[in-house]
Every structure is written in structure tokens, then in C-alpha cells.
Amino acid sequence: MKIGKMISVLLSLIIPSILYVHYYPWLYNKINNLTERGQDLDDQMDFVNVMLMFLVTWILIALFVFFIMTPLILKKK
């Protein structure tokens, strides 16, 4: 059960990281080709950047749970 939950959490963090690093610049470039308002962004996915985005997101969620949610849960008991 814990392994399945861990895989679910990992996928829920890695997918937005990939979207942020690859899909959004690609979409921006497609829209920019139509509007011609600025320079294109580099839309090549860099594995290290994806992993860094994943780690930063995971750390922020962990800090949120530790500092915000845990005191609220303990206060209710």
C-alpha cells in the first residue's frame, strides 16, 4: 500500500515538472509564432532541470506539511 502511494505521489510531482520544463515553453513558442511578439523559448527538455523541479516541488510540499499541516492536525487532538 505504501509503495503504491509513494509511486502516486512521485508521478503527481514529476508530471507537472515535465509540463513546466517542456510543454509550457513549447506552447509559448507555438503561440508566439502566431503573434510574433517576442523571442522563442528553448523548448528542449533537460533531464537535470526536470529532476531539480521535481526536488524543489517535493521539498516545498514537505515543508508545507511539516510546518503548516502538522500543527493543525496536532491541535485538533
Image (cartoon, rainbow, N blue to C red):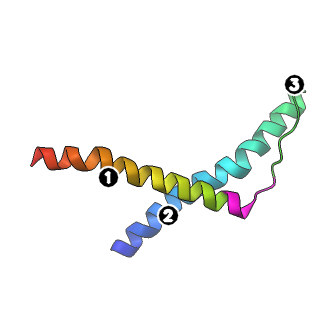
Between 48 and 18, the residue placed more toward the observer is: 48
Between 69 and 14, the residue placed more toward the observer is: 69
**Residue that numbered label 3 is attached to:** 37
Q: Position of residue 19 (x, y in %)?
A: 65, 50
Which numbered disc covers residue 25? none
Is 6 placed left or right of 71 in the picture?
right
- Of marks 1 and 2, the one in the foreground: 1
Is 63 placed left or right of 51 in the picture?
left
Mark 1–mark 2 contact, CB under 8 Å? no
Q: Position of residue 30 (x, y in %)?
A: 83, 38
Would you place residue 36 above or below residue 25 in this image? above
The amino acid marked with disc number 3 is Arg
Which numbered disc covers residue 10? 2
Is 3 placed left or right of 10 in the picture?
left
The amino acid marked with disc number 1 is Phe
Tell which circle, 3 or 2, labels the residue nearer the N-terminal end: 2
Mark 3–mark 2 contact, CB under 8 Å? no
User: CA–CA distance between discs 1 and 2?
Assistant: 18 Å
Tell which circle, 1 or 3, labels the residue nearer the N-terminal end: 3
At mark 2, the secondary structure is: helix
Q: Position of residue 21 (x, y in %)?
A: 70, 50
At mark 3, the secondary structure is: loop
First to last magenta residue range: 44-49
Tell which circle, 1 or 2, labels the residue nearer the N-terminal end: 2
**Residue that numbered label 1 is attached to:** 66
Location of residue 18 by image quarter: bottom right
**Magenta-colored stretch includes residue 47:** yes
